[in-house]
Structure formats: C-alpha cells, structure tokens
Image: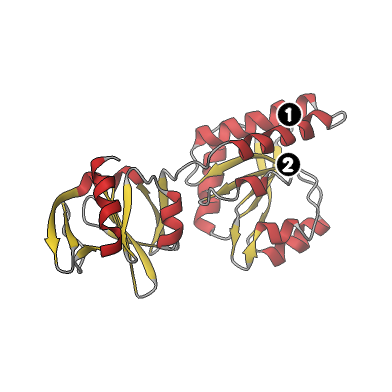
Amino acid sequence: MESPLRIVIVEDEPVSSIYLEKKISETGKSFQVVGKVDSVSDGLIYFTENTSYDLVFMDIQLGDGTCFDLLNEVRIQKPIIFCTTFDNYAMQAFKYNSIDYLLKPVNSEDVDNALAKYSSIYSSDTATGDDYFNRLDNALKSLQQTPATKKKRFLIRTENHLEIVYIEDIVCFYSEEGQSYIVDNKGAIFSTEYTLDRIEEMVSSDEFFRINRKAMIRIETIKSIEDYVNNRLKVFLNIDAISFDLIVSRNRVKEFKNWIRGN
C-alpha cells in the first residue's frame, strides 16, 4: 500500500488552511498533514527541527513577514507548492524548490494538477535531481518571457468568512481615507488590502480606467458621461453605490476619451 503523502501547510489564516486541506482531500490522494506553520518565526523553528515531510504548501504573506523571509533563513530541501492571492511573486517563487504556483482561492483541480506534477517529477527524477532543477530553470525562463497574467478574482475577508469576487462582476475600485474598496454589480462594497496603484497594475487596461487618484471604473458599467466644470467629465455608472461623484481629472480627459473609443 502506498504511503500517504506527508504535507506541511504554511498559512497564517486558519480558515484558508482548512479550505486548502479540504481541496487536497477532494483530489482523492492519500495524504497526512504532519505540520502547520502560521508565521515566519514558527517556520524557522519547525523547518530547522523537522525533515520528516514530503511536500510543503506555502502561502506568500504571513503574519510577521513573507515566506521569502523564511526561505532566505532556512533551506527547505523538499518541494514547495505556493498558494497565494498575489500573482506578482511567481518569478521569485521559482528561485526556490517550487513545483507550482496556485492563485487563491484554489480549487481541487488546481491542487490535483499540482500533486500530479509532484508525482511526475519525483517518480522519475529522484535519483539525481538533475532533471528537476533543469525544469525549474526552464520554468523561470518561461516566466521571464511571458507577460504577467491579469488578475481574475479577488479573495475578500468579510467578518469571519472568505468571499470570492470575480473580476467580471466588479463595477469599480475606489479609495477613501487610505482604504481601498471594490464595488460589485449588485452594489456590494468590499474592502481590499491592495492600493489603487497596485490594482491598476493587476487589472486589464482595456476593461478598467483610472479616472482620478481615488477611483477606477469598468467600461461595461458606464451608463452615461456628462461635461463637468473646468473641462472635466462626470461619469455615471449602472450601479449607484458610491457616495461621491465620479469625475475624470482634467489631465486624464483626453486619454479617457481614447479609452472609450477603443484607441
């Protein structure tokens, strides 16, 4: 009988840890969670003292730093599957023993494919490890040549549970008093940890436009546009959920009109 896969989960959110364990179980693979780590400091202790595991599922952002703070201090010899809401760390992740990079919320198919990749690599490459590291080098080169993937969904924490907001359901993003928010097509408003500057990099410029320093809107949700004072424009959306006027800054009007035209 095949021995269960011994897994360590590095995740600072208990709900996310339970969710991941559920998705692993849905793959039908035989496994055992032999350790759970929720911080860089705990990870330094755990991985220094323990080697009896086969695979690590690792979140990027931990309560007291990032997983790279941990990986730069202690050498983890076993393969790592990164699971994170951030898509901008992929190249950095592949510098370590990464065999996959999954964006949260992961599904059982994502996890199944990652575990299949693990099985494929370690059933044929364990003898020398040369092929494994060649694959890592090739993956890193591929990432360097491939444009960054735009975000498809946001994982939002609302009180004691997590909620998924898909990019196609988002009407606009805005910031207020240093906090950024997401507005969906039902008028619901969610806070997010990302700044508008970061969100602007993460979403498609064909779909979203930063009309001023505090708001970014989706083109499909524009109801009408009116002239406004000082050669600016005022935008009305299909959803009336924002307490302030959506004004296109004067220095962005020309670019905004070109965006509307599809230029």
| Residue at (49% x, 47% y) in the render | 104
Q: Residue furthest top?
A: 124
| Residue at (72% x, 60% y) in the render | 70
Residue 168 placed where, x, y %?
31, 43
| Residue at (19% x, 49% y) in the render | 222
**Can you see residue 249?**
no
Query: Which amino acid type corresponds to the residue marked 1 in the rendered image?
Result: Ile
**Can you see residue 73?**
yes
Q: Residues within 10 Å of mark 2 (few under 14, many from 20)?
A: some
Residue 158 placed where, x, y %?
37, 61
Say whether residue 73 is left or right of residue 19: right
Q: State the quadrant of the N terminus.
A: top right
Q: In the rendered structure, find residue 79 and report the number of the disc placed on it.
A: 2
State how far apart marks 1 and 2 are (Cα): 10 Å
The residue that mark 1 highlights is 121
Residue 32 placed where, x, y %?
67, 42
**In this view of the protein, which residue sits in the foreground, 153 or 43?**
153
**Vertically, is 20 above or below 132?**
below
Instruction: Tell me the quarter of the picture where residue 36 sits.
Output: bottom right
| Residue at (32% x, 66% y) in the render | 214
Instruction: Tell me the quarter of the picture where residue 188 sits.
Output: bottom left
Asked whether the beta carbons under mark 1 and mark 2 sit within 8 Å of each other, the answer is yes
**In this view of the protein, which residue sits in the foreground, 209 or 97?**
209
